[in-house]
Image: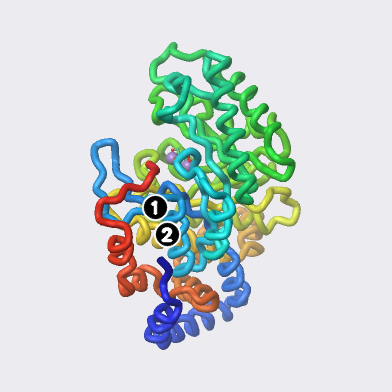
Amino acid sequence: MRIDNQKIKQLNDQALPDHRESFDHLSKVLNKKNIDVNRAVEKLKEFQVAIPSWALGTGGTRFGRFSGGGEPRSLEEKIGDVGLLHQLSQSAGAISLHIPWDIPEDVEAIKSLAASHNLLFDAVNSNTFQDQPDQELSYKFGSLCHVDKAVRQQAIDHNLEVIKYGDALGSKSLTVWLADGSSFPGQLNFKKAFQRTLDSLQQIYAGMPSDWKMFVEYKPYEPNFYSTVIQDWGSSHMLADKLGDRAYSLVDLGHHLPNTNIEQIVATLMMVGKLGGFHFNDSKYGDDDVTVGSLKPYQLFLIFNELVDGMEDPSSNNPYPAWMIDASHNLKDPLEDLLQSLEAIRVAYAQALLVDRKALEEARENNDPTLAQEILQGAYRTDVRPLLAEARLQAEGALDPVAAFRALNVRKELIAARGEKTVSTGL
Ligand code: LRH
Ligand code: MN
Ligand code: MN
């Protein structure tokens, strides 16, 4: 389904006087601080975040899953859902696919469907953490790190196949996340497992088209509870470094042990030009995959402060990172939740754009932590939502996406079209 643009416009027209008032007020405040409001709005218009195909259904936990109905039943319907998110938010201009959950049967038809929603294909993801029904060998004891060469080869071949699908669709990167590790002390030879993983990744890297990038995602635990082969940014960076110029680390915000200073990891990886991709979510205990910004918005701002610093640093050779959401939705409507995540990401980005970097650097040079904090928190405490709304308005999105989603009964229509008991593939 697609929303009638006229209906979005009607809702915007109703909300326009209030929006103008708050946008004008914020513009005045920012102008006094010599902040270029138009530049910020333009930057927000450009900033697009990929939606994971696996987050369009109601998530759940290993204890249960409570579907809200109207979930996408096919890749076409998943693209349709991302199209809706993009239409409302004008900031979800890409989809990230997970193979084999999203095998495109008719590549040309899928490409033109995505193009009709103005969507690009972001990184494709391989899956060697589950056994598929028709699979010959099991990944129970690992995939790219497996002791048996035949299992490693099967996992390598799967990744090469994922690259083929991605290439046909116009994707330019592969994200590799491995569940490989051990659940009990003594189970695995750490060094051999790492070496075998590197060897396998080298073969996958060699099979990528020359304009492709590989993103190596890390995670400390789960599903294995004693060790994970690519446990942290150090391991990921070691692999990316050995693989070559087109291999990078991918930071998933939920993949750190509690209290890890993620913003420092971001700054350090960007310093050496090795931050390739990002998975946004929020986390209190582990890989909780909850709505971005729902728990630690200040941490998200501090991370964006480093991202913007890295992106604006003329001496940096870090590529423009691939932005992706990687969240799962227990209880909430997945599309509403994704709209909230998109908003939270853009709020943090906009706040980071407001930071006076020259003044911050001076405060640092003068060993003035008080002033440095004033500068950062001054930006963080600015209500930037009118800037986001203005960017959406100019791009013909909805001034208030969640309110529009509800007012236009989008979920009700999806349920009517797809049914109450549909189940989307994913986690
Ligand atoms: C692993 C992960 C990884 C997977 C996705 C489904 O926890 O973050 O990115 O591909 O979840
Ligand atoms: Mn992830
Ligand atoms: Mn995860």
* Residue 160 position within the rendered picture, expressed as x and y whole percent measured from the top left: 61, 33
Side of 352 relative to 242 (left or right) = left
On the question of residue 334 being in view, the answer is yes
How are the residues colored? rainbow
Numbered disc total: 2
The quarter of the displayed image where residue 174 is located: top right
Side of 74 relative to 125 (left or right) = left
* Residue at (54% x, 59% y) in the render: 114
Q: Which amino acid does label 2 sit on?
A: Asp
Q: What element carries label 1?
A: loop
* Distance in Å between CA atoms under marks 2 and 1: 7 Å
* Residue 339 position within the rendered picture, expressed as x and y whole percent measured from the top left: 41, 62
Dot 2 or dot 1: first in sequence order is 1
The quarter of the displayed image where residue 371 is located: bottom right
Label 2, on which residue?
81
Q: What residue type is labelled 1?
A: Leu
* Residue 111 position within the rendered picture, expressed as x and y whole percent measured from the top left: 57, 55
Q: Does the residue labelled 1 lie within 8 Å of ligand 1?
A: no
* Residue at (38% x, 38% y) in the render: 286
Tell whether label 1 touches label 2 (CB within 8 Å). Answer: yes
Label 1, on which residue?
56
On the question of residue 268 being in view, the answer is no
Q: Which of 124 and 224 is in front in this view?
A: 124
Neighbor class of circle 1 (other Cα within 10 Å; few <14, some 14-19, many 20+) is: many
The quarter of the rendered structure image containing the N terminus is bottom left
* Residue at (39% x, 52% y) in the render: 56
Q: Is mark 2 on a helix, strand or loop?
A: helix
The quarter of the rendered structure image containing the C terminus is top left
Side of 417 relative to 392 (left or right) = left
With respect to residue 327, does 46 lie above or below? below
Work out which residue is located at the far bottom of the displayed protein and give it: 17
With respect to residue 70, does 227 lie above or below? above
